[in-house]
Amino acid sequence: MTLPAPTYDLMLLLDTQAEDATRAKIVADARAAIEAQGELVRYDEWGERALAYPIERKASADYHLLQFHAGSPELLAALNRSLRITDGILRFRIIKLKPGVPEAPDMQASASAPRRAEAESPATEAAPEGEAQAELAVGEPA
């Protein structure tokens, strides 16, 4: 019995000052590479969001999440190589998900919702027990 292909998250942080066509091409190229050698499970465009810290003197980025199954390690190496040299990408990260990891949140819905939940919940709240964690597979060095 063969094991199912592992699931990976590819998070792209694109430069908001790059042209829309350039950003669309970066995402389209990543999707095409994934679909050629694997299976695209989910694509979410999270839109422009503030960065936790400035990257290349920029305070915000255009976020994109692609979840996929990799048929072979060559796909990960090809994505890593092409994304590393592509202009317009501030950061990217490819993360191998452990089995049982919950689905990614719907960030489009949370972007329009007010942030009252953060103010009401205590800041020192611990993470629930048994919560699955992600494992770093391949990505750009910090």
Image (spheres, rainbow, N blue to C red):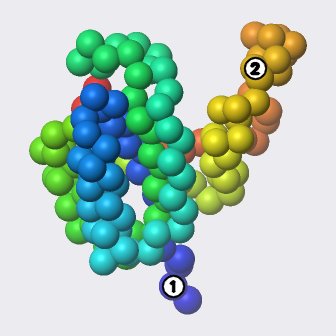
Q: Residue at x 67, y 46 (%)?
A: 106
* Residue position for label 1: 2
Picture mark count: 2
Q: Position of residue 4 (x, y in %)?
A: 53, 77
Q: Nearer the viewer, residue 76 or 104?
A: 104
Q: Quadrant of the C terminus?
A: top left
Q: Which mark is residue 115?
A: 2
Q: Specify the amino acid type for callout 2.
A: Arg
Tell which residue pokes out farthest to the left in this image: 85
Q: Residue at x 47, y 31 (%)?
A: 48
Please name which of the two marks, 1 or 2, marks the residue nearer to the observer: 2
Q: Is residue 8 above or below residue 72?
A: above
Q: Position of residue 83 (x, y in %)?
A: 22, 48
Q: In terms of secondary structure, where does tag 2 sit?
A: loop
Query: In the displayed structure, does residue 92 sit left or right of residue 7?
Result: left
Q: Tell me if label 1 and label 2 are in contact, CB under 8 Å.
A: no
Q: In terms of secondary structure, where does tag 1 sit?
A: loop
